[in-house]
Image (cartoon, rainbow, N blue to C red):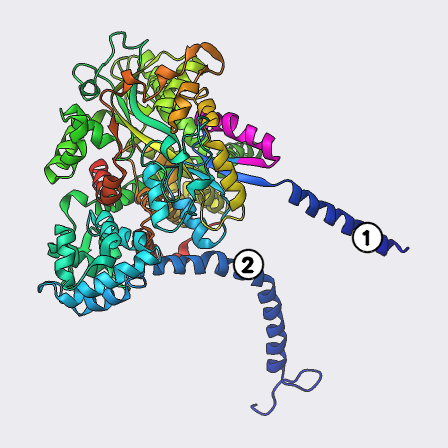
């Protein structure tokens, strides 16, 4: 055998080996919000799923929104297989044809036999998206700085009583709702008031009262950092991020649950992914009763299935810390909760975003 | 003279022979730059042109709602709605729903008319059951169909070739009856941001020049060993990631940061009332000046390096003071470097985006941050393209001014 021939054979062997290993090691790219939240998903969903199926999960972070999905779908080069999105974005992605439809029949029933559709929170399973958690925008403060801290949403807007900078998400979402709640609108009436021009003016007028004291954040990991650095005395945040800073890093942060704005996170599959079957399997597995309950022991976001609630235990590294009372849906936290109205936002987000940006810049 | 042309060895006229050999050299040179040219055209010029067409071209309504688009083009934008327009609308709504395109259509109209998303979706769900007269049917379904403004918004959305986005980019908006009007005052933002962008870029350029000129002068005139050390110090930031440098400024400038701690220690500020140096325009200016500084120093340095010290010595030997020798002799020779550095810094600054996004807070944002917002958050890529187009026009305008005032031939990058 000549040298050249043996080389050809060898390289052919290597090549076929590479092809074989690529085929056996299936992998799924799951995109989520990063930080403590992604970590909870890795522990509760990714690892057990890899164990069960042998397929690996590549975890990527993003900052929300569906622009990347749109870019991938329109370019015909979809590299994300499963994406964790907010409800309004899930509906929008479905509307714009950017997400695969998901047949709810793939979802397993609850352990007691309740069909999946009645086990998930009413109306939360949509054409293209399967919900996993209930999360909430709350505000928090550092109790080592303010021993007699704020109690209500009005206190957040009261710079005379509680001087200092505030952190807020750079988006009209949740901020308009909280501003109206602080101005005395009942939780159930928020979107009725916002549906009038006078109501929107009223919300912006309330935001105006603290505009000069606000530091705006964009990524979920920023507000705990701003609090820890002493940059702000209180900040709106996603409740799980504050919980994580308290539970894992022993930060002296307190959550104020008054006028929390709660929302869902859901899994969608970008249209045209090559791993659709695998993605469907991942979603069905991750949103079953046990997995959702498991996730709740890593971060304080409420499971989207009713049957998961009794299974929620304590924090994974602190058995003394029961997770139940930390959830947005715990009765004590839920009294004045506002549900994010995704239909209202779908109709008004263009106008509200423009107005909010203009308000910020001027 | 004319018939005694100089001939080459093989008898062909020398001129022709020369042209032949020059052509071969040129061909070879072209062959060498060909890969780069292809890369630039395919990865830079074409995508930009493609993106810019989105500023004036939008078929998201017209391609999915053809009948309604045709009806809208015939309508003058103010006379009462006719049954034909309503019938075309209903027929398109039914088809769009069947093809699952209704979301795209609804979101397009929603940009012009808040509430259109749910209106279009709910109407399309029941459109199949509608019976003539369709205008009545639409109005029975939802009273918003009575609103002339809704139909005007649809007419605007149905324009495939439109100046509407460019109008939006300069705080105007298209009218259904033709022409443009100022955007609602509460939604005006772009002009403010364009002015602020130019203002910030200008201040950063001047600050870089004031800080960079002495450094470049030192580098060009100190002994080689010292100047090399300086050069490394100037280039060091280049080797550090932009994000790291920007976040380092956050640690330096924030309320509980290094600078403020020093100010408090020296009694410049009280502990309760620290300076706001970051998350505002000040933060953007400081961080951007630092990041742009090497782009000013390097062109200055390369020009100053070529200025012979003999000129200044000659001026001094003829009685000029230090200042006169510098101002009359040295400075004019460094102007090409100033021009190159300033133009480079200004044009880089005008499209800058990461630093203002991280440290700009609310009043330190620039136009590129809004372009980013429309690319990533609102998904209004047409408006993003229109804003980019306006920004490009601005840059070309400043380039033209520069050419008129300083002359582009006078620029020297090295």
Vertical comparison of A323 with B179: above or below: above
Q: Give the alpha-carbon distance from disc 2 to disc 1, as whole Å.
A: 37 Å
Identify the mark at residue B36; answer none if there is no mark.
2
Nearest the viewer among A299 and B176 is A299
Q: Quadrant of the N terminus of chain B?
A: bottom right
Image coords of residue A186 (percent x, y): 15, 26
* In front: label 2 or label 1: 1
Q: Residue at x 33, y 34 (%)?
A: B284
Image coords of residue B208 (percent x, y): 37, 38
Identify the mark at residue B114; answer none if there is no mark.
none
Please name the residue that numbered disc 1 is placed on: A9
Nearest the viewer among A14 and B16 is A14
Image coords of residue B34 (percent x, y): 57, 63
Vertical comparison of A13 with B255: above or below: below
Magenta residue span: A35-58
Secondary structure of residue under mark 2: helix
């Amino acid at each position: 055998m000549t040298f050249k021939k043996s080389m050809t054979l060898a390289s052919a062997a290597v090549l076929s080996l590479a092809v074989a290993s690529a085929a056996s090691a299936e992998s799924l790219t799951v995109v989520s919000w990063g930080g403590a939240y992604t970590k909870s998903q890795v522990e509760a969903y990714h690892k057990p799923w890899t164990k069960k199926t042998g397929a690996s999960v590549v975890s990527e972070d993003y900052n929300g929104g569906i622009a990347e999905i749109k870019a991938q779908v329109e370019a015909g080069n979809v590299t994300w297989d499963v994406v964790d999105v907010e409800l309004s974005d899930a509906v929008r992605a479905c509307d714009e044809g950017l997400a695969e439809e998901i047949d709810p029949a793939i979802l397993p029933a609850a352990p007691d036999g309740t069909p999946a559709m009645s086990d998930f929170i009413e109306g939360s399973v949509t054409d293209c998206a399967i919900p996993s958690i209930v999360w909430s925008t709350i505000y928090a403060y550092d109790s080592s700085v303010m021993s007699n801290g704020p109690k209500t949403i009005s206190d957040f807007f009261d710079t005379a009583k509680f001087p200092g900078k505030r952190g807020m998400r750079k988006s009209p979402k949740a901020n308009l709702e909280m501003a109206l709640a602080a101005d005395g609108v009942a939780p159930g009436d928020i979107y009725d008031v916002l549906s009038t021009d006078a109501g929107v003016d009223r919300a912006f007028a309330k935001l105006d009262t603290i505009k000069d004291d606000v530091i705006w954040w964009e990524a979920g990991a920023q507000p705990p950092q701003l609090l820890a650095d002493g940059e702000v005395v209180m900040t709106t945040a996603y409740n799980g991020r504050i919980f994580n800073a308290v539970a894992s890093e022993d930060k002296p942060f307190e959550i104020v649950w008054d006028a929390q704005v709660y929302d869902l996170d859901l899994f969608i599959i970008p249209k045209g992914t090559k791993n659709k079957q695998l993605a469907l399997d991942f979603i069905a597995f991750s949103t079953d009763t046990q997995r959702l309950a498991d996730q709740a022991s890593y971060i304080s976001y409420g499971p989207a299935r009713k049957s998961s609630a009794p299974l929620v235990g304590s924090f994974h590294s602190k058995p003394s810390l029961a997770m139940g009372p930390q959830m947005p849906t715990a009765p004590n936290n839920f009294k004045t909760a506002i549900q994010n109205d995704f239909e209202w936002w779908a109709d008004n987000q263009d106008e509200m975003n423009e107005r909010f940006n203009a308000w910020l810049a001027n | 003279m004319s018939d005694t042309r100089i001939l080459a060895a093989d008898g062909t006229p020398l001129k022709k022979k020369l042209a032949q050999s020059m052509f071969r050299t040129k061909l070879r040179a072209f062959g060498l730059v060909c890969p780069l040219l292809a890369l630039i055209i395919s990865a830079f010029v074409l995508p930009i042109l493609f993106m810019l067409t989105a500023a004036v071209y939008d078929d998201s309504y017209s391609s999915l709602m053809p009948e309604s688009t045709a009806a809208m083009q015939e309508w003058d934008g103010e006379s009462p709605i006719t049954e034909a327009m309503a019938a075309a609308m209903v027929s398109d709504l039914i088809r769009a729903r069947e093809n699952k395109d209704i979301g795209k259509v609804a979101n397009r109209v929603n940009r012009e008319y808040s509430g259109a998303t749910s209106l279009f979706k709910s109407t399309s769900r029941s459109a199949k059951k509608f019976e003539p007269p369709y205008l009545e049917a639409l109005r029975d379904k939802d009273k918003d169909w009575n609103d002339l403004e809704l139909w005007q918004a649809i007419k605007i959305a149905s324009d495939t070739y439109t100046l509407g986005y460019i109008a939006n980019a300069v705080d105007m908006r298209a009218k259904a009856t033709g022409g443009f009007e100022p955007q609602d005052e509460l939604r005006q933002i772009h002009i403010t941001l364009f002015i602020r962008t130019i203002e910030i870029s200008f201040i950063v350029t001047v600050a870089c020049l004031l800080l960079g000129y002495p450094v470049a002068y030192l580098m060009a005139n100190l002994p080689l060993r010292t100047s090399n050390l300086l050069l490394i110090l100037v280039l060091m930031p280049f080797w550090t990631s932009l994000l790291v440098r920007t976040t380092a400024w956050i640690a330096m400038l924030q309320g509980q940061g290094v600078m403020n701690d020093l100010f408090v220690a020296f009694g410049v500020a009280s502990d309760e009332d620290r300076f706001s140096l970051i998350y505002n325009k000040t933060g953007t200016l400081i961080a951007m000046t630092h990041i742009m500084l090497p782009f000013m120093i390097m062109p200055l340095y390369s020009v100053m390096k070529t200025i012979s010290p003999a000129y200044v010595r000659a001026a001094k030997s003829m009685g000029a003071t230090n200042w006169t020798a510098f101002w009359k002799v040295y400075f004019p020779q460094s102007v090409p470097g100033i021009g190159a550095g300033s133009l480079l810094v200004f044009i880089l600054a005008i499209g800058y985006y990461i630093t203002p996004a991280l440290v700009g807070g609310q009043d330190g944002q620039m136009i590129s941050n809004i372009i980013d917002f429309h690319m990533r958050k609102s998904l209004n890529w047409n408006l993003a393209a229109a804003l980019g187009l306006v920004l490009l026009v601005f840059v070309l305008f400043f380039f033209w001014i520069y050419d008129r005032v300083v002359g582009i031939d006078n620029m020297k990058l090295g």
